[in-house]
Image: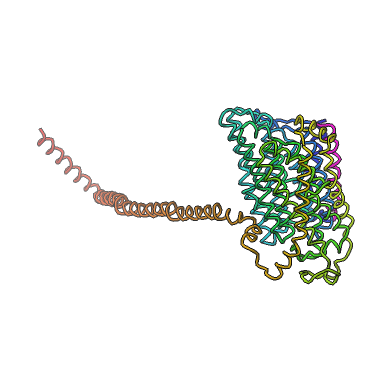
């Protein structure tokens, strides 16, 4: 059984590594090899979800690398593999022949492998390793077209923001070890002792909120939209952004054990769903609208995790993954064809390409929370969990549900408006159809698009009594909280009312925008993602850069100055030592040598070689010696 689990992880990891290393040499084979690897991974994921394998291997002293497909992992591995396969098939024509296709498809597979390890890891050490690989792969994918400086900067922003929050996992791991959880098993984290339990919970919550683009980290998701549309469909629907929500759902017992982490998580998710929903409503860029809606929709998952609604959050995660990835892929087709991301310029896109427009409409209506589509049913479960936990949370979530209907209908309204020249077209069109762009989208793009659209429409069956009981048993969450019929009626009425109001209100907004293009300050504030990016620069980036400059100046003027002065002092001392050596020691040595030379010269003078002089010298010597003896005595 463990061989199946190892194969599930090794296949995308090995194929992705080979494609990345091969690079351009795989340009012709990568569009075939990568989808094949994705399909095989999906088959292995389904088999693993049925058989529930587990595996373990030594990692560090006392810590093992544990892997297991349990109830929540079974849902996640199938979801991740399915969305990855759909994105890989869609991407067959995304990367041009002059680009590095091997690196592109390889990074997609590496990212999927890291996500699969994340959702199957049973120990924090292994999860942390996969978490890091996932972050690095996302940075490379967002900045795939790195020759454009704006895309590279966007990738850096996304990476640094999530990387800063990821430090929470290191904090959690250290606190768990200090708290007596030597194995770092995820199931054992709630058993940490004393204050270390709270530090562990704080680290997990920080890392999860950062990865899932919740407040105050949401702004990185706006910058991440510089990546290719298929990358956005993968990273920001079922994988990277959902990884934070998954971690909170997985560690829901830890949130409960701390007593404060659950309410904090729930309120953060509810406020993110509300405020980022307002941000999505204000957007005129379709990818920015989808990005803000991703943060808002993940907010519902985070709310469910904090409220103890693990089953509700899981259904929301799976349904949102299918809906949002399909919307990103449909938008990607239009962006490639029309070369614009502005909603007014996408007017009539759904009419130009009806097959794509129908899939986009299905996804937008599901995202709006309209009955009987999947996200309506999933949000009912989340709203029920919120109401059972705190009525104030339920009220905020219901308002966020209304905003979801508004921004979804806004996107749908623009792309379905009549084309210029058609009846009822109006006079405010911003785009004219380009010649040569009416061609039918490739079948490789339509098949995954429609598969995701259908899944997004029907996944609401998971909340019906039979499937819901099965899912609760699968996840081990016990009895489901009762869902009252009036809750479903209220949520449906709110969504339908907000959608109808938005559809009526949008023509007047479009006309007012045409007459007065400068929006109100509150709208501009929401359109700029609540100024979160600017606030991060003001509160974090600028102080850190100022501190770095101050430290650099201190290093240059004080530390390096002291080193330079020490060097100058050393040189001065060396010069003094040289003078002392030259004028003292060397002079003394020279004087001794000169004296020795003089003594030698004096001693050499009696050495004449004449015998009679030697006799005379001997007589003088003996006489002097005799005189000395006589005087001494």
Q: Position of residue 5 (x, y in %)?
A: 80, 35
Q: Position of residue 155 (x, y in %)?
A: 67, 54
85 with respect to 281 (left or right)? right
The stretch of residues the image draws in magenta is: 28-53
The reply to whether the magenta stretch includes residue 35 is yes
Q: Quadrant of the N terminus?
A: top right
Q: Residue at x 48, y 52 (%)?
A: 551
The answer to which of 294 and 60 lies nearer the viewer is: 294
Any part of residue 433 in sight: no
444 with respect to 116 (left or right)? right
The answer to which of 576 and 176 lies nearer the viewer is: 176
Any part of residue 379 in sight: yes
The answer to which of 328 and 471 lies nearer the viewer is: 471
Q: Is residue 193 above or below residue 223?
A: above
Q: Quadrant of the C terminus?
A: top left
Q: Total marks drawn?
A: 0
* Occupied quadrant, residue 335: bottom right
Extreme residue toward the front, this view = 486
Q: Residue at x 13, y 35 (%)?
A: 629
Q: Position of residue 381 (x, y in %)?
A: 76, 39
Q: Main secondary structure of the magenta part?
A: helix
Q: Residue at x 65, y 67 (%)?
A: 518
* Occupied quadrant, residue 579: bottom left
Q: Position of residue 190 (x, y in %)?
A: 64, 30
The reply to whether the magenta stretch includes residue 102 is no
136 with respect to 616 (left or right)? right
């Amino acid at each position: 059984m463990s061989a199946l689990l190892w194969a599930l992880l090794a296949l995308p990891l090995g194929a992705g590594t080979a494609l990345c290393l091969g690079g351009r040499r795989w340009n012709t084979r990568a569009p075939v090899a990568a989808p094949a690897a994705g399909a095989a991974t999906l088959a292995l994921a389904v088999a693993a979800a049925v058989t529930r394998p587990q595996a373990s291997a030594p990692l560090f002293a006392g810590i093992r690398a544990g892997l297991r497909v349990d109830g929540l992992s079974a849902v996640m591995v199938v979801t991740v593999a399915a969305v990855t396969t759909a994105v890989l098939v869609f991407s067959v024509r995304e990367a041009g022949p002059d680009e590095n296709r091997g690196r592109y498809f390889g990074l997609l597979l590496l990212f999927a492998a890291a996500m699969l390890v994340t959702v199957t890891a049973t120990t924090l050490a292994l999860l942390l390793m996969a978490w890091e690989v996932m972050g690095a792969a996302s940075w490379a994918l967002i900045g795939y077209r790195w020759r454009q400086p704006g895309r590279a900067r966007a990738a850096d922003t996304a990476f640094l923001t999530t990387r800063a929050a990821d430090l929470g996992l290191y904090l959690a791991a250290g606190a768990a070890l200090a708290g007596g959880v030597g194995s770092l098993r995820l199931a054992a984290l709630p058993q940490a002792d004393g204050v270390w339990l709270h530090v562990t919970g704080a680290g997990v919550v920080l890392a999860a909120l950062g990865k899932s683009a919740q407040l105050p980290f949401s702004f990185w998701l706006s910058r991440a939209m510089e990546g290719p549309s298929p990358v956005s469909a993968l990273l920001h629907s079922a994988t990277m952004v959902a990884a934070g929500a998954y971690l909170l759902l997985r560690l829901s017992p830890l949130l409960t054990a701390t007593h404060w982490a659950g309410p904090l998580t729930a309120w953060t998710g509810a406020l993110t769903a509300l405020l980022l929903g307002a941000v999505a409503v204000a957007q005129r860029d379709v990818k920015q609208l989808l990005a803000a809606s991703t943060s808002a929709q993940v907010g519902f998952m985070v709310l469910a995790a904090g409220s103890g609604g693990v089953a509700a959050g899981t259904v929301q995660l799976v349904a949102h993954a299918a809906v949002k990835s399909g919307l990103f892929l449909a938008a990607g087709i239009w962006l490639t064809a029309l070369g614009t991301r502005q909603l007014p310029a996408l007017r009539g896109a759904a009419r130009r390409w009806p097959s794509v427009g129908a899939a986009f409409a299905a996804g937008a209506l599901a995202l709006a929370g309209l009955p009987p589509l999947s996200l309506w049913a999933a949000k009912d479960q989340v709203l029920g969990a919120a109401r059972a936990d705190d009525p104030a949370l339920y009220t905020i979530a219901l308002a966020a549900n209304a905003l979801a209907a508004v921004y979804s209908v806004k996107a749908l309204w623009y792309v379905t408006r009549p084309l210029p020249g058609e009846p009822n077209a109006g006079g405010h069109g911003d785009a004219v159809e380009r010649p040569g762009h009416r061609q039918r989208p490739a079948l490789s793009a339509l098949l995954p698009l429609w598969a995701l659209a259908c899944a997004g429409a029907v996944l609401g069956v998971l909340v019906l009594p039979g499937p819901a009981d099965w899912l609760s048993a699968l996840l081990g969450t016990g009895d489901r909280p009762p869902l009252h019929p009036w809750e479903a009626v209220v949520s449906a009425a709110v969504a339908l009312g907000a959608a109808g109001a938005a559809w009526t209100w949008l023509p007047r907004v479009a006309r007012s925008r045409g007459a007065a293009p400068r929006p109100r300050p509150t709208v501009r504030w929401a359109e700029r993602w609540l100024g979160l990016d600017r606030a991060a620069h003001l509160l974090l980036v600028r102080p850190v850069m100022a501190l770095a400059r101050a430290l650099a100046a201190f290093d240059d003027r004080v530390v390096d100055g002291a080193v330079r002065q020490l060097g100058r002092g050393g040189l001065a001392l060396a010069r003094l030592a040289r003078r002392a050596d030259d004028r003292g020691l060397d002079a003394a040595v020279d004087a001794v040598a000169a004296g020795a030379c003089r003594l030698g010269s004096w001693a050499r003078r009696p050495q004449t070689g004449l015998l009679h002089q030697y006799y005379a010298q001997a007589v003088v010597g003996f006489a002097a010696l005799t005189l000395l003896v006589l005087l001494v005595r």
